[in-house]
Amino acid sequence: MTPGTPSTPRIRRTARSRVPGGVLACAATLLAVAPGGCGMMRGETPTTGPSRVQSSSERPTVTAGDLVAAGRVLRTRGDVERALRAFERAIEMNPQYTAAYLAAGDIYREQGDYSSAERSYGQAAQIEPRNFDAQYSHGLALQLLSRFGEAVRAYLRALAIRPDDFQANLNIATAYLQLGDAEQGLPYAQRAVRLSPSSGEARVNLASIYAGLGRHTEAVTELQQASEMMSLNGSLLLNLANSLYQLGRFAEAANTLEEAVRLEPGAIAYERLGASRYRLGQATEAEAAFRRSLEADPAHYPAMNGVAVCLLSRYVLSDQTDEAARLEAMGMLRNSLRIEPQQPRVIELVRQFGA
């Protein structure tokens, strides 16, 4: 089935119709299903098969719950498409069955079809407003769709049901940060850490909130604790270096960034390393780092500005005789402005040294 398709073609209810792959045959006897197959139906023996043809009145009645249970078995076995068809058939049979919407939504989300997941979860949340899983999952799908304001409202509904859920507190804090409202996210990020003090993820999240509020000393503390709880990665180290830089701890920032580019070399990390080296008066090392940033991403304009500043410093120190350095610097700054025109300080440098 193509992700995003709301339902499969309706199956006609004839005496022979069934969910493809024998889902209905499994559903009525789900508790007896063995890992190797659907098990024997009533009146069947290992050697002879069905002992007689059953009348329609004797056939087991299949419910939406049976279909969901069968779909879960199929999903466990890796047969995701048939599982999804079973969940959708359950919704056709009982449009008010919350579990079917949640199960279908989980598959859509895992397939990356966040729009279909949001619709399924949203329907579940509407049918059963006091269902935590429905509200939380709806919030998650909305967040994955970058609909952060709606995600916050869904998470708030989930937290009204279960205030101390770790993941809901963690996610709503992130959603507030994505909205640019770190202040609102702070209490939820703090609660997530209280709920799971050994979670490095929660501490990184709280550190991001602190950094967004300009509370870099607290951000450094949280990130240092997180580094003891989880494997070091470039993102964690970059965040730590940024807060150290904001605190004027340039040597520590540079050392942290050296480790970051060793683990995950990239344009942003090299550019930040260049800025830290420049602040330490290490212009040659700074320029080299800025150029490494541009090797990783030729359009990373902060690194262009960094190279230009190093070149202009060289020009000034030469008593304004190093014309090659000035010309290259002007080229870098003009390229930077073509990418991002709203840079007043760069415009001023071009005016000052461009003549």
Image (tube, rainbow, N blue to C red):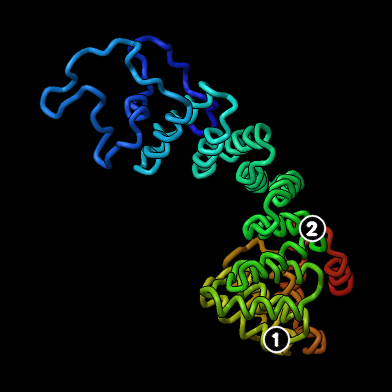
- Residue named by callout 2: 180
How many C-alpha atoms fall within 10 Å of the one at disc 2: few (<14), some, or many (≥20)? few
Which residue lies most toward the left here? 47
Determine if residue 87 is in view. Answer: yes
Q: Position of residue 313 (x, y in %)?
A: 77, 83
Q: Position of residue 250 (x, y in %)?
A: 72, 86
In-front residue for pair 199/256: 199
Residue 184 against residue 261 in the figure, above or below: above
Q: As shown in the figure, which amino acid type bears the numbered disc 1?
A: Ala
Q: Secondary structure at mark 2?
A: loop
Q: Circles 2 and 1: CB distance less than 8 Å? A: no
What label does residue 283 carry, if any?
Answer: 1
Residue 179 against residue 277 in the figure, above or below: above
In-front residue for pair 345/215: 215
Q: Nearer the viewer, mark 2 or mark 1?
A: 2
Q: Position of residue 148 (x, y in %)?
A: 73, 48
Answer left or right for 306 relative to 262. right
Residue drawn at x 14%, y 29% is: 46
Residue drawn at x 35%, y 34% is: 30
Residue drawn at x 60%, y 75% is: 226
Residue 238 against residue 162 in the figure, above or below: below
Q: As shown in the figure, which amino acid type bears the numbered disc 2?
A: Gly
Determine if residue 324 is in view. Answer: no
| Numbered circles on residues, count | 2
Residue drawn at x 67%, y 76% is: 222
Answer left or right for 48 relative to 206. left
In-front residue for pair 256/273: 256
Quarter holding residue 213: bottom right
Q: Secondary structure at mark 1?
A: helix
* Residue at mark 2 to residue at mark 1: CA–CA distance: 34 Å
Answer left or right for 278 relative to 198. right
Q: Position of residue 36 (x, y in %)?
A: 24, 40
